[in-house]
Amino acid sequence: MTSDSSSAPVESTQLAAVTDGVAQVFRWEADARIEVRGLGREVVIEANAAGLRTLAGHLLVLAGEGVPDGSHLHLEDGNGLEDGSLGLVLERCDDE
């Protein structure tokens, strides 16, 4: 993770998304920093404490009761992730 300024949200931010009529609200904690990078065959998600709580909250929203299969959230460089990060998609899939 870099210590310089990033394009990740610096104040508490929220995003509402609606899938099949079900609203989901994703929140970013103030000062959350999340970086995603590839190391060979591994993906590293590195985050400060606020970033980890933010990711955990996103996953809990997607795991919520009544959230439709296929609901997802795109996180990208400059859109929720540190500059230079790989894109990350969090998606609910209830198919076995």
Image (cartoon, grey):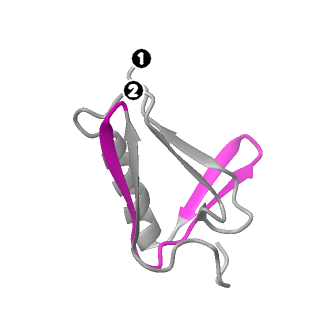
Q: Earlier in the sequence, mark 2 or mark 1?
A: 2
Quarter occupied by residue 19: top left
Most distant residue in the left direction: 65
Most distant residue in the top direction: 96
Question: Which residue in the structure is indicated by mark 1?
Answer: 95
Magenta part of the chain: 20-46
- Locate residue 8 relative to residue 87 in the image: left or right: left
Label placed on residue 81 = none
Q: Is residue 52 above or below residue 21?
A: below
Along the line of sight, the residue nearer the viewer: 39 or 55: 55
User: Main SS type for the magenta part?
Assistant: strand
Q: Residue at x 57, y 63 (%)?
A: 46
Along the line of sight, the residue nearer the viewer: 59 or 76: 76
**Label 2 SS:** loop
User: Which amino acid type is marked by label 1?
Assistant: Asp
Most distant residue in the right direction: 40
- Crowdedness near tag 1: few (<14), some (14–19) or many (≥20) residues, C-alpha within 10 Å: few
Along the line of sight, the residue nearer the viewer: 20 or 10: 20
Q: Is residue 82 above or below residue 89?
A: below
Q: Residue at x 60, y 62 (%)?
A: 79
**Label 1 SS:** loop
Contact flag, marks 2 and 1 (Cβ < 8 Å): yes
Q: Residue at x 65, y 83 (%)?
A: 5
Question: Which residue in the structure is indicated by mark 2?
Answer: 69
